Amino acid sequence: MKVLFIDPPGRVKGINLGFAFLAAVLKKENHEVKVLDFNNRYQINQELILKKTLAEFKPDIVGFTMLSLSYYACMKLIDKVKRYHKCKVIVGGAQTFIEQEQLLKDNRNIDVVAIGEGEETILELARAFEHKMALNDVKGIIFRSSGRIVRTEKRPLIKDINSLPLPDYEALGIKHFNFEGKHAYPILTSRGCPYNCNFCYSQVLSNRSWRARTPESLITELKLAVKKFDCELFSIVDDNFTLDIARAEKFCNLLIKEKLNLNWVCMARADKLTESLVQKMKLSGCERVQIGVESLVPEIFNDIDKGESLEDIKNAVKLFKKYKIKIYSFFIIGLPKDTFKGVMDSYRFSKEIGFDFNSWQNLMPLPRTRVFDWVKKHGKILKDYKNQSSQLFEVGFETPEFTKEEREKAFNIIAIKEKAYPFDPRKSTFQNGLITLKLILQYDMFHLPAHTYKLTRKAFNIAFKGKTQALSGIEFVD
Ligand code: B12
Ligand code: SF4
């Protein structure tokens, strides 16, 4: 079977790892796979490329990843695919857990909705379509049969993720991961997370389970990444890399033993750290760790139910600083009970703790999370959740104690002070520049020379390297 995967354009650039795993299992069974990455390659003429690919590749199956924020873009592309080409359209990805049957009701061009991990599902679907078999035995799908919508048995999570082939990034058309050493090779060392943070969607995907790959298989993948993609830096994209400290430490030991000489970055929980692990991380090339803090206001922090304390976070920062590993943080603006004052206090405290960089994002309440139910009850929704953004100066909801205007102001002040200039891909570079300049004059005039320097460098990158490379750092084959 010929399978074409399409990643719809979204607001945040990055590699679709899911497709790399799906491509690997399909290719292992001799199916042909192609991927159209419209998320990272948004400046190309997508309509033209789509038509050309459908006409030349003639896929039997076209598969889409649908995240909440790529819902509308995905729906449009599905209609185009069916307009230009006769094939089966399958939709997978995080948003299917929310939509379920509704997707089939809303769009007659969708043939199958695949809920959950897709490696086994896509193989079984490809076999079923190839041999014109009924789909009833394929777990984890919803499809139409004789005018009725049929739902099959739930697809269980894959027990042993080590049984999967290594992800195939060549199928995604990627040439280099080391564009000026900036873009990291993404590696998934485990799946899922057992914690219960009130804003997080991971529980929906993994049912609070955690499954890990062996350190040995990770080393095999990284050796190949060096050979195939010249990679110099890798990024662990797990929800919870450090849950099993012994495994994490063994991985670091192997990196040292095998002399891979790669730098790496990861996300980690502050409570799951030991001095011995942090030391090994440094010795094995870890240069930066990102931890989720969300808020430094105790009342708000405790409500998240992170399963760790503010003390854990402060201790983790000290430990990483001791071993000269850069420490980045993630903060959320607008969690339950938050106020403008709360955010600005949290920002001030973050400076005292001494993170090397802070990333601040607006809360995006997603259905099936506790914050979504809280917002529905206590707040006023201003924007369809599928159309919101954590990054731009746009706000999806407000509460009586924290208005839309205050939320925008808090976001803008922090974005400018942190020099994390918001970039709206829907606007031109010139328009983005003007907005940023206005915000600098409004909120951080004192540091105008430093802003001018940073912005000039950014503009230079965009002008000379093209938007895609400047923003995502990914280089493609063609
Ligand atoms: C890496 C990552 C990214 C990358 C790549 C995203 C991508 N397209 O995969 C980038 C940086 C682009 C990204 C961006 C964002 N992300 Co993100 N991201 C992740 C992260 C950490 C890992 C994803 C991953 O690689 N998983 C491992 C692979 C193997 O799983 P997978 O991608 O889900 O694919 C499997 C199945 O879903 C299924 N599948 C997927 N597609 C298809 C298609 C077919 C046909 C089939 C059959 C099956 C199938 O099979 C795959 C293999 O098992 C997840 C967290 C998580 N636990 O998943 C968040 C996550 C997916 N991101 C999330 C969010 C909210 C965002 C942002 C909105 C963040 C922001 N600050 O704005 C943006 C929006 C992206 C956009 N398009 O605009 C949410 C999604 C929630 C939702 N309901 O949509 C998650 C779940 C985080 C969370 N805990 O809340 N993200
Ligand atoms: S620890 Fe991270 S991945 Fe796990 S539930 Fe909390 S935010 Fe989600």
Image: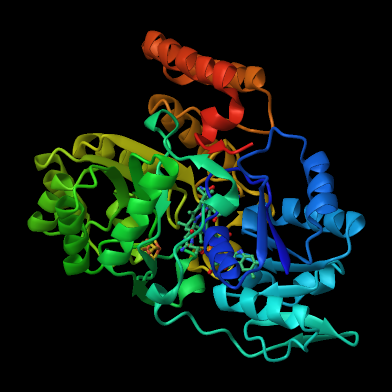
In the rendered image, residue 342, in percent from the top left (x then y), is placed at 37, 44
* 188 to the left or right of 90: left
**In this rendering, would 65 be left or right of 54?**
left
Residue displayed at 24% across by 47% down:
260
Q: What residue is rendered at 23% in x and 42% in y?
A: 261
Give the image quarter of residue 207: bottom left
Work out whether residue 161 or residue 338 is closer to the camera in this orientation and state it.
Answer: 161
Q: State the count of labels.
A: 0
Can you give x and y, in whole percent of width and height, for residue 243 in the image? 26, 67
On screen, 387 above or below 99? above
Is 28 above or below relative to 381? below
Residue 97 in which image quadrant: bottom right
Q: Which residue is at the front of the view, 148 or 264? A: 264
* Left or right side of 375 for 279: left
At 54% across and 64% down in the image, what residue appears? Answer: 24
Residue 291 picture location, percent across and down:
30, 50
Residue 65 visible? The answer is no
